[in-house]
Image (cartoon, helix red, strand yellow):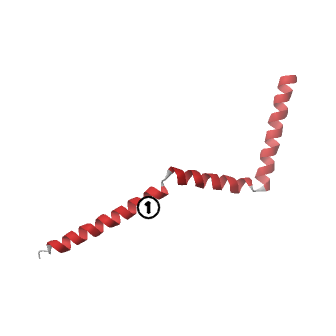
Amino acid sequence: MARDPDTIQREIEQARDALAATLDQLGDKASPKRLVEGAKAEARTKMDDPRVKYALIGAGVLVGLLLVRKIFG
């Protein structure tokens, strides 16, 4: 049974619109700016954890002391 050309044209346009919407969504999800913002937010969240914050401070102090010892020792 042959299909009406107008029906076929409408289906093609609907498929094109659906594909365009999907590509827009993928573009938004893969946006470098969005990925960077997400990574920064995640890093800020981790830095708010006292265990992580104090461990990094301790590591920084240790590295600083080792550098001072290397320079003056």
Q: Residue at x 19, y 71 (%)?
A: 8
Judged left or right of residue 66, residue 22 is: left
For mark 1, what is the residue? 25
The answer to whether residue 73 is seen in the rendering is no
The answer to whether residue 25 is seen in the rendering is yes
Residue furthest toward the right? Answer: 73
Q: Residue at x 83, y 24 (%)?
A: 71
Question: In which quadrant of the rendered image does the N terminus lie?
Answer: bottom left
Q: Is residue 70 above or below residue 16?
A: above
When asked about the image quadrant of residue 58, the answer is top right
Judged left or right of residue 54, residue 12 is: left
Judged left or right of residue 54, residue 26 is: left
Question: In which quadrant of the rendered image does the C terminus lie?
Answer: top right
Q: Is residue 14 above or below residue 37?
A: below
Residue furthest toward the bottom? Answer: 1
Q: Residue at x 53, y 51 (%)?
A: 33
Residue furthest toward the left? Answer: 2
Q: Residue at x 29, y 64 (%)?
A: 16
